[in-house]
Amino acid sequence: MGLFSVFRITLFSLTVAFSLIGLGLNAYYISLTAPYFYYNFSVLGVATAVLTILTVPIMLTVEFVRRGAFTSMIVFELSWLFILAILWVATAGEAIYVSNIFFPRGCIYADVDPIENAYCMELQAVEAFAFLNFFIFLGYTCTLLIFSIIGASRGNSVWTYSVKEATFFAQKSWPAQQQTPLNQYSGAPATGYTSGAPPTGYTGTPVSQPQQLGTYTTHSSTPAQSPHMHPQQPVYSGQPQGIPV
């Protein structure tokens, strides 16, 4: 198990713990106004806390029990955790809205009305734990998204793998391809052909091919006489030439 997986389990454990606290606080506010009305932040906080408590441990458990489940895929994890982050920040926003209406000056009623001051402090606790879960989910989602983009850019398929199985920073090694040179022929020669032997059915005398010697002659300064030049004239020596009988 890598360092990032341990960090991930730690963050998920914190979100589950914070969700349990938020569930208790929001359920308490619902119990105060249950017969007549509900605050939006309390209902949304209970629903978001229940979703977090149920889904996050299931995602971790399925990842260790079953390999290749869709709940363990990074693309699913990014989508679902981003939705939870939005729900938690919406809960915090609704709690701040109610707090600004009923306690615009903050929790300063300890001496005047201790019960009213306790409500104010509990409402601030709802805001705090909602923001904590939002920041944890948002920070983890952004980090995982950056790691996934880096892994995909290096040739690793990470979107359909779990965080435990994915490879983010290793460069993918491609198999080496063996190439055969084009000027080499490793097949058998054509049928009916034998090097240096005449083809089948040939009855004539084989003619040897002329061979070119590796010796070259140097041209002299005297030009060679062409066989097409005029014949040489006889030289007259001054004595009569007899005609043989």
Image (tube, helix red, strand yellow):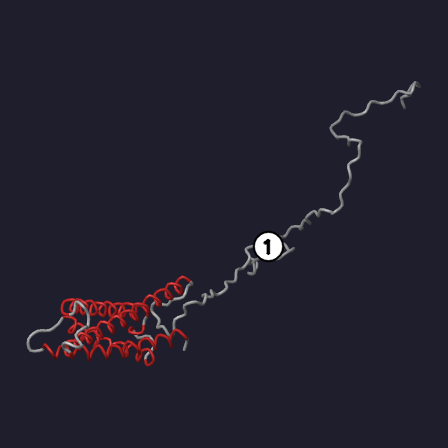
| Residue 119 point in image, percent of width and height | 16, 76
Residue that appears at 37% across and 66% down? 148
Tell me which corner region of the image, top left, top right, bottom left or bottom right, holds residue 143: bottom left
Identify which residue, 57 or 164, lies in the foreground: 57
In the displayed image of the protein, which residue is found farthest to the right? 239
Position of the N terminus by quadrant: bottom left
Does the rendering let one see residue 206? yes
Q: Is residue 7 above or below residue 172?
A: below
Q: Which residue is mark 1?
A: 201
Q: Image quadrant for the C terminus? A: top right
**In the displayed structure, does residue 219 sit left or right of residue 141?**
right
Give the vertical position of 230 relative to 22 (above or below). above
Q: Residues within 10 Å of mark 1 (few under 14, many from 20)?
A: few
Q: Is label 1 in a helix, a strand or a loop?
A: loop
Residue nearest the observer in this picture, 72 or 244: 72
Q: Position of residue 215 (x, y in %)?
A: 76, 45
Residue at the extreme left of the image, as rendered = 36
Query: Measuring 6% from the left and 75% from the top, which residue is drawn there?
Result: 36
Compare residues 6 and 128 and report the one nearer the observer. Answer: 128
The answer to whether residue 204 is above or below residue 166 is above
Residue 245 in view of the camera = no
Count the labels in the image: 1
Residue 208, percent from left and from top:
69, 49
